[in-house]
Image (cartoon, rainbow, N blue to C red):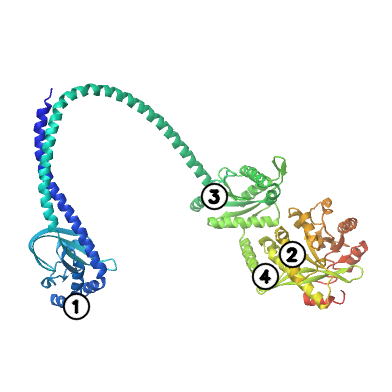
Amino acid sequence: MFNLSRYFSTVSFVLIVLAAGVLGPFYRQLSLQQITELAESRNVAMAQIFENSLRAPLEELLVASLGRDAEFLRQSSEVAILRENVVTLMRNTSVVQVKIYNRLGVMVFSFDPRQIGEEHLNHPGFRAAMAGLLTSELEKFSTFAGFDGTRTDIDVLSSYIPAVGSGGAVEGVFELYQEVTPFMHQLQRSLWWVTAGVFMVFALLFLMQYVVVRRAQRILEEQEGRITSARDTLELQVEARTEELKRTNTQLQGEIGERRQAESKLNYLAYHDPLTGLANRRCFIERLEDSLRESAEQGYQMAVLFIDLDQFKQVNDSLGHGVGDELLVSVAARLTDQVRLIDMLARLGGDEFICLMERVRSEEELAIVANEIIDAFDLPFRLGDHELFLSASVGISLFPRDGMTVVELMRNADTAMYCAKAIGRGHFHFYTPEMTRDAQARIRMENLLRRALEHGELAVHLQPQVDSRSGLLVGAEALARWTSPELGVVQPSHFIPLAEDSGIIVPLGNWVLRETCRQVRQWEQSGFDLPMVSVNLSVKQLERPEFLDVLRGILDETGMDPAKLKLELTESVLMGVGDPSAMLQRLCELGISLALDDFGTGYSSLSYLKTLPIQQLKIDRSFITGIGKSRGDEAIIRTIMQLADSLGFEVVAEGVETTEQATFLATLGCQQLQGDLHGRALPAAEFRSRWSAYA
């Protein structure tokens, strides 16, 4: 068997000698490196102290020294001041000498005046420091001239340190000398002790290991048997671990698959509407951007169809958002059947859908698709117990005719859709430049109307309501009139619908109410007693939960008698309120009268009419103009009069312009007449002057 003891003895002895020979120099070099790093860090810290404490005089000296000769520098007052400050800072430190160079390599400061003015431009330490680097050198001097005199047999670490100016650039170089003699003496003593200790330890280790190695021969033989047994056991353990890793890997693969599915779902949700599964706005815009580039390169037309559902809000408000969501899903499925596979259908949100049609040949092709989309709503939507009828309005913009960008095409299609909706439900319209001008004019008028409310450009005119038999004044209807500095006289048929669409009708209607009540109360106090005044209400006013409080506040503020105030509501206004009967009842409890305006033009049920707490019906002017011309209009008027008589309602006829109309209505028993025959709407002052004698 291999003689392990002899082999180990020879090799160990050689290695111990080599190790001792290597460790000694290594320890000395390591200690020198530590001493150098310590002293170098102290030099850097000291240089930083000089920079922070003496920044102003130091920067002045570095700048002033440029281009000066040695004699000037030796006589410089800045050097003298700097010497005093440096001595103060160096006292009780291990720094024995400081030299300062400007950026040209000229020594501008030293405790040895003879050295001032010397040039060290090519010195490696100076050049490294000017480049922002720190260099140091450990030297031994038999004699060394320090700031406090000459020292003998001294070990010194010199460091070249960049002097950074306030602007962040290197303006000069510090050369600091730090005494490390005590450290070197301690190093020498330590080195002897370490060397002796190493030899002793290695010798002891050699003896101990020799004993161990002698026994190792026997132990190895014993271990060989154990290793064989352990190897067999290890193989079994490796097999078991391999099976465990296989199971873990299978589980990990499953988790990776689940994560990929989750990422795929997130990516899907980022580009699809979660309710309908259609593309969302983001996906549509990105597809449209790509199609625009492709269309521009290949020169074909494409179109954007903006689709909005008519009266979808009523479904949500009456049946709830759950039914509304189901309806949107059904609408999406029905719309998908109407578009080509190459087209993209997306839901923008709410009840708004949008379609991108690529490679369009003509407007006729688009018209066919738009009609197919509209016709798709002819059949009802059956959702559980509900059968719902909807219609859609479609606006179309064409690339490149109607826009070159995503924003232009979508905006113009939206504008065209609103024009289609203005025509009536279930229509489509192509975009034209006039639509944008109309929209801009509409926005301008809306802004001017808001300003008119703030600057008092609006006025309340009153149109008389007279007794059909006596001709005496029995009331008046308050009507808003607008004279704009920019637009002139704006007809109510222009600005009232605009106010309704924009929501301005709420502050406008409240202003008309307040101004009318104030005027009637003022007349009453000055001797002109107007028996009754009528004011029109908008559905948006009635929808506001605070409207009753606003109305009550106006009555209290103006002192108006509620019995002299009549509020006029149309059938469409009542249909837009959730519970009109309850709302009207609360108005009546304030002492206010109620009239149903434009009667006969709406769609309300006559059986429902008898449940409403109203006192007056107003026959729409469209029927009055047919008196003497249309038997149908006359028959409708007779029917309305019979209905009003049976329900106990008073009747007012609007738009009476001829004596023939007045006579016909009086014969049927119509109590009050209103129209140009008896007087058009007048400003308050003119109205009082004209009618004070007839009240």
**Amino acid type shown at disc 2:** Leu
Helix, strand or loop at label 2? It is helix
Separation of residues labelled 2 and 4 (CA atoms): 19 Å
Helix, strand or loop at label 3? It is helix
Q: Point out the image quarter for the N terminus.
A: top left
Pick whichever of labels 4 and 1 is earlier in the sequence. 1
Residue 125: image x %, image y %? 16, 61
The disc at residue 284 is 3
Residue placed under numbered mark 2 in the picture: 551
What residue is shown at x 12% (from left), y 73% (from top)? 113
Q: Give the vertical position of 630 relative to 273 (above or below).
A: below
Q: Are marks 3 and 2 in contact (CB under 8 Å)?
A: no
Pick whichever of labels 1 and 2 is earlier in the sequence. 1
Pick whichever of labels 3 and 2 is earlier in the sequence. 3
Residue placed under numbered mark 4 in the picture: 453
Pick whichever of labels 4 and 3 is earlier in the sequence. 3
Mark in front: 1 vs 3: 1
Mark in front: 2 vs 4: 2
Badge 1 local density, few (<14 within 10 Å), some, or many (20+)?
A: few
Mark in front: 3 vs 2: 2
Residue 127: image x %, image y %? 18, 63
Residue 149: image x %, image y %? 10, 68
Badge 4 local density, few (<14 within 10 Å), some, or many (20+)?
A: some
Q: Quadrant of residue 229?
A: top left
Residue placed under numbered mark 1 in the picture: 77
Helix, strand or loop at label 4? It is helix
Q: Quadrant of residue 80?
A: bottom left
Q: Residue furthest right?
A: 667
